[in-house]
Image: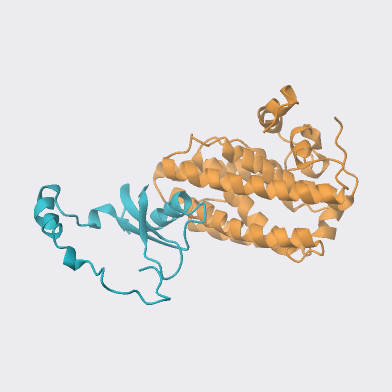
Chain colours: A cyan, B orange
Amino acid sequence: MESGDKVWEVFVQKKPGLPFKHAGNVHAYDKKMAIQNARDLYTRRSEGRALWVVPTEAIISVPLGDADAFFDPADDKAYRHATFYDVPDGVKHL
Amino acid sequence: MNITVENKEAKWLLRLADTSLILGQRLAELCSKGPFLEQDIALSNISLDLFGRAEELYKIIATIENNAFTPNQYVFHRNEREYYNIKLVEQPNEDFAWTIAKQYFHDVYAIEAFKQLADSPNKQLSGLSHKVLKELQYSHLHSRDWMYRLGLGTDESNKRLQDAVDRLLKYTNEIFEFDELDQTYFSDCEKIKTTWNKEINTLLSEVNITRKETPPLSMRDFRDGFHSEHIGHLLSIMQYLPRAYPDAKW
């Protein structure tokens, strides 16, 4: 088991089928403490039925300086949005 | 105000209600003073569960007593000798090891106690007990986990836990000196004692803590309203506001 105080990112799922959403982070010394701390901080008001914790260091993010190259090209491509598509009745959480 | 409790079952329930309340108050003292933020909130959550449990128990007592008094009156207008909590839970938070050992000793006892009450003929009580057991399951997970962390952590954490266990164990014997009321309302008193000893002995040996012989306590039974010196200080803080300002509203 990992040891030493580190930061873990917390993801909460409100109910089965819905995506896990980032809720915040916690400090903890290992996996077990991380999940217990996450339970105490982020689900005390019935926010969810499932939890993930991930060491912050395991998350790979786009370097801030590269943001333009990564994201700007999408700004003028409206055709990528499927606005012409009729959503069938009964489809939830789209 | 002189608070009286007439019914036998109500008198007995005060032991459970007071035990939950006083432990809740002890944990609440750590609110904003926990060892780190996450544990601060964990302890406060458990404290709130204990207050909620106590309130529901006082409501059941009030119902049995035909609403002669309200839960607030039971909490804020009784004196030391009118409190019937186990002495274990009024012991102070000398350090985090004390807080954890106290909580763990309580949780193991309370789980078996509420398991038996889940079959109580008193429907309000059995309903509450089912809910309480879920809370206790988590609280036990938390306190037990920290017993491992402290016992198997560093030399210092082991030393502190050993000290806490030595000092707190002597307050546990009286819990199992059951009287006639206990025999009436618990379905199997002996099982509470054997279950507790079995789990505590197993855990302590797993976390390198020695269970030493405890000399008999020179204090009389909590069932008769006897306490250690700490209860008065605790009540004076807890009861100060409603006693100093009787007209104050929440």
Q: Quadrant of the C terminus of chain B?
A: top right
Q: As drawn, which residue projects farthest toward the top?
A: B244
Residue B156: give x, y in percent of width and height.
42, 41
Q: Where is residue A18, by image quadrant?
A: bottom left
For this view, does A3 lie left or right of residue B160? left
Q: Where is residue B123, by image quadrant?
A: bottom right
Can residue B116 be seen at all in this image of the molecule? yes
* Above-or-below relation of B57 to B76: below
**Residue in the foreground of this view, choosing between B140 and B173:** B140
Can residue A30 be seen at all in this image of the molecule? no
| Residue depicted at 44% across the width and 52% down the height | A42
| Residue depicted at 51% across the width and 42% down the height | B97
* Above-or-below relation of A90 to B196: below
Residue B180: give x, y in percent of width and height.
86, 55
Residue B48: give x, y in percent of width and height.
60, 45
Q: How many marks?
A: 0
| Residue depicted at 71% across the width and 27% down the height | B248
**Residue in the foreground of this view, choosing between B84 and A75:** A75
| Residue depicted at 28% across the width and 74% down the height | A85
For this view, does A59 lie left or right of residue B88? left
Q: Where is residue B128, by image quadrant?
A: bottom right
**Residue in the foreground of this view, choosing between A52 and B101:** A52
Q: Quadrant of the N terminus of chain B?
A: top right
